[in-house]
Amino acid sequence: MEPMILGPERTTRRNWQLAALLAAAAGILNSVGFVAVALYTSHMTGVTAALADSAVIAEWDVVVLAIGAIAAFIAGAMTCAVVFNWCRRRELHGRFAAVLGIEAALILLVGLLADRLDTDLDGWRTVLIVVVLCFTMGLQNALITKISSAQIRTTHVTGMVTDIGIELGKLVYRSRRPGHDPVRADGQKLALHVSLVGLFIVGGMVGAAGYLTFGFAVLVPVAVVLIVAAVPPLAADWRERRA
């Protein structure tokens, strides 16, 4: 039987299910990162702006942190491409699941260990947390980009809000001219992006409230859910290799 939302055979429904899961996860991770270390770990536009601003006012610790965050995000996207293509060349079911499994493992490590790191090394602790979370966001964003052929993003909402505005503009545009096709909004696309933005917001609320209550342990359930999603296609590959 074909694995569920992370199988190699893609459908619109599976892509939407995965996007919903990842948008909620990104919202949680983003908010945890901000509440814990004052940095939105999925928001590379803001990190780049912080780098530029801090360079002008000579806040070099922020500059170094921002450079590390951007480099980690890029490294995550690169890792996704390497792992995905390695698996694809071998025709593995788990070409997408392997990437999500790496993300889940890193999130689990942060959830279990971050609160135990030596607070006397608080600066290095912050850098480590930022680098790991940004790396996972790079992985995730590249993963959904691969799966959806660059139609969906889940780690930031700028593109989604833009698409919502475009479809709403089409919806209210009523001009009709002879010889021209009418302008029609894509209702499914509009519904998808509205739901993803909503899930990102809900995830952010859960992440912020959860961190204030449980600390980094709030990330453990997120990791477990992602692992559960990744297991079926990876298990299918394992069974085939042993057959």
Image (cartoon, rainbow, N blue to C red):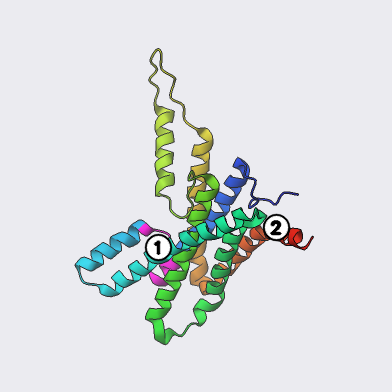
Eyeballing the image, is 123 above or below 154? below
Q: Which residue is mark 1?
A: 40
Q: Is residue 183 left or right of residue 206?
A: left
Farthest residue in the top direction?
A: 178
Mark 1 residue crowding within 10 angstroms, few (<14) / some (14–19) / many (20+):
many
Q: Choose mark 2 or mark 1, whichever is in front.
A: 2
The picture places residue 79, in percent across and down from the top left corner, at 50, 62
Q: Locate residue 174 relative to residue 50 in the image: left or right.
A: right
State the SS at label 1: loop
Q: In x, y percent, where is residue 53?
A: 24, 63
Q: Residue at x 49, y 52 (%)?
A: 154
Q: Which residue is mark 2?
A: 232
Judge whether residue 223 can be spotted in this image: yes
Residue 202 visible in image: no
Residue depicted at 45% across the width and 73% down the height: 129
Give coordinates of residue 190: x percent, y percent.
49, 38
Q: Which stretch did the figure color magenta? A: 33-44
For mark 2, does the 10 Å Cα neighbourhood hold few (<14), some (14 to 19), or many (20 or more) residues?
Answer: many
Q: Secondary structure at mark 2?
A: helix
Q: Is residue 96 magenta?
A: no
